[in-house]
Structure formats: structure tokens, C-alpha cells
Image (cartoon, grey):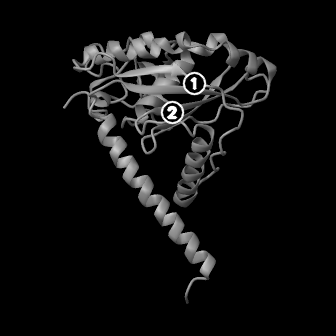
Amino acid sequence: MSLPRFATIRVVLLLGCLIVVGFVSAHQRVYTRNWNQTLEVVIYPINGDGHLATDSYIQKLEDADFSIVNRWGEREAQRHQLPLATPFDVRLGESIATLPPAYPAQANAMDVLLWSLRFRYWAWRQTPDAGSLTRIRMFVVYQTGEDRVPLQHSLGMQKGLMGLVFAYSLDKQTAQNNIVIAHELLHTVGAIDKYNSSGGPLMGVGYANPYRSPLYPQRNAEIMAGRIPTSPARSYMAESLRSVIVNSYTASEINWID
């Protein structure tokens, strides 16, 4: 049975969008992982709960609040002997008034695909002059936490070079917010998560120093795990990027080492 004309047009348009997205994504993947020049990363803050306190926090943000991410990247790049001294340059962009499309609950593969296209369209509408195809856009949705609504799960998309971060608009949380931003940033250049279903670091690949003797306690967290293990079953969230590193597994995934 043939599809109705409208349905056929819809399928053709969707396939066309996927072809274009695939071509652009392939270009972005090759370019960003060459590490021939510093990648530009722009933070776009969003008031996620409409609170005045959240708005006040956003209004006070400045480039300096994210400069530790740059220093951390420089430190880790040097540690892995990356020829590029400054792998990324994180700066603050304009705030955005419109919330991103909600990620579907209990989503199947098609739900995720459609959400991804909606998110890309939303991002293009909010940042139509984003310019460079290799600029990484990090959309950070802040909330005070006063209404006890838990933070949604953050994510980073290698296809499209975009991150969606959910963070607390509290001064005491700024340092840990930067850990999440750095984590999702590395997702956009190929890094994969290294924590288990309970949120704890995966044995070995999720440890900053899997060859340390004695193994516990670890002194640092691995960026794609985010927690410092003190035993096989216990770990705690790193307080800032000062105690977070890129281990060799992650360095290989983002093409810092062979």
C-alpha cells in the first residue's frame, strides 16, 4: 500500500535532514579531533525555573567563572604532551530566554532521533549567528534547587557539537557545575561515560590512576566518571576541576594520544 502524499513528503524531508546532518557531523568530527587549533566553546545560560535568584546568578556570570575549564584543559593537554597548548577556549555567550525541548521519558531510538532534530532546530533558532561549524555550543540550564526539583541528566552531542547541561544557580555549586560542563564538553569530541548504573566510576577505565598501588583511595577523579573512589563500592563527587584529570582511556578517545 502506497503512503499518502503528505506522509511521503514528510519522510523525504526527514531523510534529507538526516543526510545533511550526517555530512556536517562527519566534517565536524574530523576537524575537532585534529587538535590543530583551539576550539571555541560558548556557554549560553538559561533560567530553568524562572526564579529571580536564578536570574540574578546568571546576570553575575562572566568569562572568569569558566576560566578554570580552560586552565584545566591546558594542564591536562600538557600532561598528555598534546602539541596544542590550549585545546579549547570557553567563554560566556548571551543568555537565552527559551527552554530547550524536553528530553522524552523512557525514549526509544526514534524518540531520541526526533528529539535530537528538534533540539538542533531549537539551538539554531536561539543562536542563528553561531557561525563556525566547529564552534561548540554549551546550553546551561540553571535552577536554584529550592523547589526540590532534581536536576535532569546532562548530555553532550558529538553530532552537532552541542551540550545541554543542567546546573544549580548557587555560588557554592559553581566549581562542580564546571566539572559537568567539562564532562559534557569532552562528550562532543568523542569521550564516553565511565560510570556504572549507580553513578560510581567503572573499575579501571573510570579511575584517574588505575595502576596506583595501593589502588585506594584514589586522589583524583577521572573527568568522564566525575567521582573519586575510596573503595570498590564507595566514591564521592570531586569538588572542583583541580582534582579531576583526563586518564589515558579518555585521552585516546578524544585523539590526544594514539
The spot of residue 244 in percent (x, y) is: 41, 16
Q: Which mark is residue 117?
A: none
Sequence-wise, which precedes: disc 1 or disc 2?
1
Which one is closest to the eye, mark 1 or mark 2?
A: 1
The answer to whether residue 220 of the structure is visible from this angle is no
Please report the residue visible at 48 percent of the width from the left and 22 percent of the height from the top.
Answer: 234
Total marks in image: 2
Q: Residues within 10 Å of mark 2 (few under 14, many from 20)?
A: many
Of 57 and 27, nearer the camera is 27
Q: Secondary structure at mark 2?
A: strand
Please report the residue visible at 42 percent of the width from the left and 60 percent of the height from the top.
Answer: 19
Q: CA distance from mark 1 to mark 2?
A: 9 Å
User: Identity of the amino acid at label 2?
Assistant: Arg
User: Identity of the amino acid at label 1?
Assistant: Gly
Which quadrant does the N terminus fall into? bottom right
Residue at label 2?
A: 137
The spot of residue 85 in percent (x, y) is: 29, 15
Q: Confirm or deny contact between disc 1 and disc 2 (CB under 8 A).
A: yes
Q: Quadrant of residue 37?
A: top left
* Residue lying farthest to the left in this orientation: 258
Q: Secondary structure at mark 1?
A: loop
Residue at label 1?
A: 93
